[in-house]
Amino acid sequence: MDYLSIDRLHTWHPYSSHPSTQTPLLVRETYAQTIVLDDDTQLVDAMSSWWSAIWGYNHPNIIKALKKQANTMPHVMFGGLTHKPAIELTYKLAKLTKLPSIFLADSGSVAVEVALKTAILYQKAKGKDVSRFVALRHSYHGDTLGCMGVCDPQNSMHSLYSSYVPQNIFTSIENLGQTIVNHHKDIAGVIVEPIVQGAGGMRIHDTEYLKIARQLCSKYDLVLIADEIATGFGHTGTMWACDHGGITPDIMTVGKSLTAGAMTLSAMCATKNISDTISNSPFKALMHGPTYMGNSLACAVANASIDLFSQIDWQNKVANIQKIFTTNLSPLKAHKKVADVRCIGAIGVVELKSDKYAMALQKHCVKSGVWIRPFGKLLYSIVSYNITNDELEHITTSMTKAVYSLS
């Protein structure tokens, strides 16, 4: 069977035309930090499968949990029923986030959708009929309708839908506080990506805006939503990026690394005040329920991944990753085609001055044995925490040589 020909005929890939202008690489298997292509080529994964495979591929604890649960109960509807893997997971998430009301969802975008709906319902339950949010410029929170409404309408991939999506209030990080003050009567809440703005430009920020947002949301009884789908579970060096600012949001969304890249699962974690206010109001319930909500396979895998945090010295591992990224990538700041280099935790970013080099950079890295997926002006890597120093050196060397290969 000619799989790539069939793929070209029938498979519409993410962020792509159909058929794609670029032939995807056919993957046969994975292990540790390695992607094995169908032609036996081996690539070190510099993307940790879009930020999710924090323990690498095929970790024995994850595979064991998956197989055990598959033999017991792969899935059962969550409406009117419950099961131990989901109960254990909500307990663990409540302890980790300090937010005791957990709604399980099936993707990051859905978790954000649920968070936005919950914040609006909370305000309506208190008699405040509002449905807008303050969000940040260069923000990215997902690709579904409500999520697109809190992504920067001018500096994001969703600008074409600006007349269709919910209309919210956007501001810079520097003006966030004043914007909240000016609009607090007209909004349900504030949504932020803490510390690192991901797909909106891989921008790394100081903690002050988080503290300001927390203070003002508390003052005006606004719902502060922290979207930790990309940053959570250690990517910035702390369990949550919010921890850098010493703040706890009213709602936190988590996903990606929740299942260590093995299954699709996300969660919205909220305060007891929010869940009680909604549940004791005339509305009584949050009307949302994905078919695969609380999928027992995914919950079992998530439990196994969370348990690994207490078994592995992950914080020192992430600190070591940041040190190597910083040491090896910072010299690229002197390159004439490089605008900036920035690193935090397991994230290393090289920002070019032009967006025309992405394809050339990717081809060079793949040829040198590294899987990386630049976007726009950004050549970046987010790696698994158990990556070896040699593998990380391979990645940074490949990134450096790719930049110097540009004509």
Image (cartoon, rainbow, N blue to C red):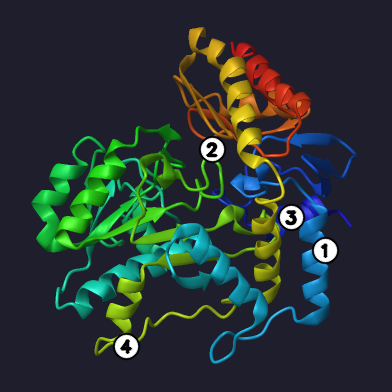
- Write down the residue under mark 1: 64
* Horizontal side, residue 102 vs residue 300: left or right: left
Determine whether the residue tagged by mark 4 lies in a helix, strand or loop.
loop
Determine whether the residue tagged by mark 2 lies in a helix, strand or loop.
loop
Residue 161 visible (yes or no): yes
> Which dot, 4 or 2, sits closer to the camera?
2
Q: How far apart are marks 2 and 1 (CA)?
A: 27 Å
Residue 296: give x, y in percent of width and height: 67, 76
Q: Which mark is residue 2?
A: none
Verify CB contact (< 8 Å) between mark 4 and mark 1: no
Determine whether the residue tagged by mark 3 lies in a helix, strand or loop.
helix
* 333 over 91 or under it: above or below: above
Hey, what amino acid is under mark 2?
A: Gly
Hey, what amino acid is under mark 3?
A: Asp
Q: Earlier in the sequence, mark 4 or mark 1?
A: 1
Quadrant where the C terminus is found in the figure: top right
> Which dot, 2 or 3, sits closer to the camera?
2
Circle 4 residues within 10 Å: few <14, some 14–19, many ≥20 = some
Q: Which of marks 2 and 3 is nearer the N terminus?
A: 3
Q: Distance between the residues labelled 3 and 4?
A: 47 Å
Q: Residue 7 carries which label?
A: 3
- Write down the residue under mark 4: 284
